Amino acid sequence: MSPRPSMDEQLDDATSQLRVVVERQRQDADPSHEDFYAWGWALTEVTARLEHLSRVLAGQVGRYGDARVLRDDEGADPAARLAEARGHLTALESALRAANGAARAYHSAAGHIAVEVDSQREGGAR
């Protein structure tokens, strides 16, 4: 049994896979409406997961110095640095909440797109 991948490896894999599918979509000269709908779901899911992660990390960062003696590599107050980092995560969570709302609205709108089939072209010209 092989060892479980590290968090770094899993994050590298996830971002690499996302990079690949984004590039594939970028290069698609004739995307289908199914792609638009699928991306709506993906954007909704990704923004929701990242919003949740931001909230989790903000809590963890807020408690990080509780059981550790910390230092800052630039000589700043580590507690102040953690408070700053937590503030950024809180702002990110808020921005992702708004992004998720936009993604859900996009997904809903994309779900109403359909392609009318031209029966003359579908069955071949007669």
Image (cartoon, rainbow, N blue to C red):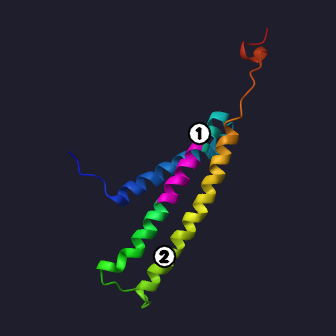
Q: Tag 1's secondary structure? A: helix
Q: Which residue is mark 2?
A: 85
**Camera-nearest residue between 122 and 112:** 112
Name the disc covering residue 38, or none: 1
23 is higher (above) or lower (below) than 54: above
12 is higher (above) or lower (below) than 45: below
Q: Quadrant of the C terminus?
A: top right
Q: Residue 125 placed where, x, y %?
A: 78, 12
Count of labels in the image: 2
Residue at the spot 59% in from the left edge and 59% down from the top edge: 97
Which residue type does callout 1 highlight?
Ala
In the rendered structure, which segment of residues is drawn in magenta? Answer: 41-52
By secondary structure, the bulk of the magenta-drawn segment is best described as helix
| Residue 100 in view, yes or no | yes
Q: Residue 42 placed where, x, y %?
A: 55, 45
81 is higher (above) or lower (below) than 18: below
Q: Residue 80 placed where, x, y %?
A: 46, 85
Say which quarter of the image contains residue 117.
top right
